[in-house]
């Protein structure tokens, strides 16, 4: 399996231990975190009810899923913009070619799609788990 696009050594970073690999990974994490925060703002997931004040797990899950859907949509749009910047407008018809995947652009698109699915799935699992755990604490400790 090829390495994720964000786990490649940055050429502008000094070759000190793993530093060239750490900075792109941290940058990727910052991007994902920023998108999830924007999703939480869009879904009003910082309200008291979103943390389990009503005692309903369905309410907590509803806020989390709405925030995740918004963040996932932003991540998909960002990935499309990055692919367009990387491949240019000439690669737009690459999917129509026979012998799938036939070009280098196809491999780039497939790799980024797999990374996108992994990012969304991992973030969803982590944040839903955290929100459910946090909601279970609300009953014991309150605000």
Image (tube, rainbow, N blue to C red):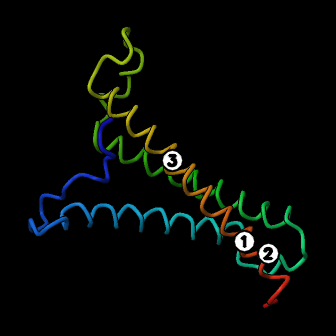
Give the quadrant of residue 127. bottom right
For the N terminus, give its image quadrant: top left
Query: How many angstroms separate mark 2 from mark 1 (CA)?
Result: 5 Å
| Left or right: 19 in relation to 97 | left
| Label 1 residue SS | helix
Q: Residue at x 49, y 51 (%)?
A: 119
Q: Residue at x 54, y 55 (%)?
A: 74
| Label 2 residue SS | helix
Q: Nearer the viewer, residue 139 or 23?
A: 139
For the C terminus, give its image quadrant: bottom right
Query: How many angstroms separate mark 2 from mark 3 (CA)?
Result: 31 Å
Give the quadrant of residue 124. bottom right
Tell me which label, 2 or 3, sits earlier in the chain: 3
At which x and y percent is residue 108?
Answer: 32, 34
| Left or right: 18 in relation to 120 | left
Q: Are marks 2 and 1 in contact (CB under 8 Å)?
A: yes
Q: Residue at x 33, y 61 (%)?
A: 25
At which x and y percent is residue 22?
Answer: 26, 65
Circle nearer the viewer, 2 or 3:
2
Q: Nearer the viewer, residue 50 or 136?
A: 136
Residue to which mark 1 is pinned: 133
Label 2 neighbourhood size at 10 Å, few (<14), some (14-19), many (20+)? some
Residue to which mark 2 is pinned: 136
Query: How many angstroms separate mark 1 from mark 3 (CA)?
Result: 28 Å
**Relative height, residue 135 to residue 12 (above, below):** below
Q: How many numbered discs?
A: 3
Label 1 neighbourhood size at 10 Å, few (<14), some (14-19), many (20+)? few
Residue to which mark 3 is pinned: 76
At which x and y percent is residue 57?
Answer: 85, 65
**Relative height, residue 100 to residue 129 (above, below):** above
**Relative height, residue 83 to residue 34 (above, below):** above
């Amino acid at each position: 399996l090829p390495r994720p696009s964000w786990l490649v050594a940055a050429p502008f970073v000094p070759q000190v231990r793993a530093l060239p690999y750490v900075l792109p990974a941290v940058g990727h994490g910052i991007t994902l975190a920023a998108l999830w925060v924007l999703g939480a703002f869009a879904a009003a997931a910082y309200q008291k009810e979103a943390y389990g004040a009503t005692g309903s797990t369905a309410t907590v899950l509803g806020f989390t899923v709405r925030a995740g859907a918004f963040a996932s949509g932003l991540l998909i749009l960002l990935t499309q913009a990055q692919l367009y910047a990387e491949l240019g407008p000439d690669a737009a018809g690459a999917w129509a070619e026979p012998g799938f995947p036939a070009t280098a652009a196809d491999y780039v698109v497939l790799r980024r799609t797999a990374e996108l699915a992994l990012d969304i799935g991992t973030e969803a699992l982590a944040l839903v788990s955290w929100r459910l755990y946090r909601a279970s604490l609300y009953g014991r400790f309150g605000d």
